[in-house]
Amino acid sequence: MRSLTLSVVLSTFLWSAPIGGVSVLVKNTPITLYEVQQEMKQSGTNATQSADTLIRKKLEQLEATEKKITVTSTEINEELARMAAQNNLSLEQFLNAMQTVRGLSEKDLRAKVEETIKGQKLYSAIAFSKMAQPSAEEENEYYQLHLDEFSRPESFAVTTYTSKSKEALAMQISDPMRHVENIQMKEENIPFGKINPQLAQILNKIPEGSFSAILPNGQNGFMSFYMRDKVNVVTENIETLRPQIANAILGEKRNQVLNDYFTRLRLSADIKVLRLP
């Protein structure tokens, strides 16, 4: 009788208590409601989409553990140094740029780099054969399809909107003709060659006549750029870009292999959606 009672108590504890905070079980490993809520907040997706993203991440984590894949601090440091050098910045400048432009703390950035390296190792562990280098024809096609990415202006003519309130800034962007309190506006001409590459990349992706996403401004506030004009746009020559294009194509192919693998894995995995926010 004592054994039965203890079993019932343990069962109640293991299932009723955690379920209040657990959203999904992936192979008996929990994803919490809090994690889903945080993913919704960060990605702007709904509960189902956010849960799907977290299920994929959890499957990757479990697969990496099963295959004994790890990432060391040295590997993360080397990748950060490589990324900084690629952007012609010191490591400190690069970390500051990612904080200002992307709103990523060093801890968040290191986590993302770790995730990327782990994904590359996972690909190596599951791929059945070595991926062939892209042909010249593939590179040419990629170049033509992504001309905007390889074009850069001499400068950006923008109106910069800043505010301490993200909500006020969002209201201003949704209705530019409306007067919103606590919004500062400044017309600027920003030279391409005098800003950090992360910001240049963001500005270059804003279509003329459109606003950027709302970004942290590094001063406990937020900013958004309205692109008035891109001055003297020049497209880089494909020959100088071939190594970059080849890496991009290989990255896309690797992602496709991983997506196919984890799609199949998810179909056979024990996944229970208990409840969503």
Image (spheres, rainbow, N blue to C red):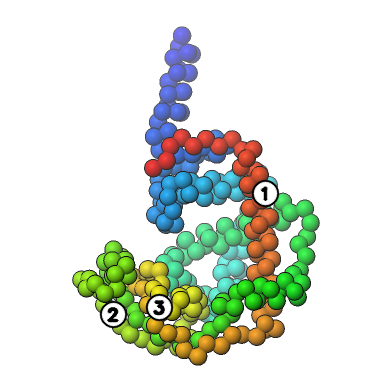
Residue 194 coordinates in the image, percent (x, y) = 46, 87
The residue most toward the top is: 1
Q: Residues within 10 Å of mark 3 (few under 14, many from 20)?
A: few
The alpha-carbon separation of the residues under discs 3 and 1 comes to 41 Å
Q: Secondary structure at mark 3?
A: loop
Which mark is first along the chain, 1 or 3?
Answer: 3
Residue 115 screen position, x and y as percent:
57, 57
C-alpha span from label 1 to label 2: 48 Å
Q: Give the residue at mark 1.
A: 261
Spot occupied by residue 70 in the image (x, y as percentages of width and height): 63, 53
87 with respect to 135 (left or right):
left
Disc 2 marks which residue?
185
Residue at position x 66%, y 72% in the image = 142
Q: Is residue 176 left or right of residue 130?
A: left
Q: Tell me the crowding category of disc 2: few under 14, some 14 to 19, or many 20 or more residues within 10 angstroms, Cα based.
A: few
Query: In the picture provided, is 217 more to the left or to the right than 87?
Result: left
Cα–Cα gap, marks 3 and 2: 16 Å
**Label 3 or label 2, whichever comes before in sequence order:** 2
Q: Is residue 6 left or right of residue 168?
A: right
Instruction: Check disc 3 and give the amino acid type.
Output: Gly
Residue 23 visible to the viewer: yes
Residue appearing at x 49%, y 75% in the figure = 205
The amino acid pointed to by label 1 is Tyr
Q: SS class of the residue under badge 2? A: strand
Q: Is residue 275 above or below residue 109?
A: above
Q: Of residues 122 and 51, which is closer to you in this image?
A: 51
Checking the image for residue 153, the label placed there is none
- In the rendered image, the vertical position of residue 15 relative to residue 247, given as above or below: above
Label 2 amino acid?
Met
Which residue corresponds to mark 3? 209
**Disc 3, disc 1: CB below 8 Å?**
no
Residue 229: name its quadrant: bottom left
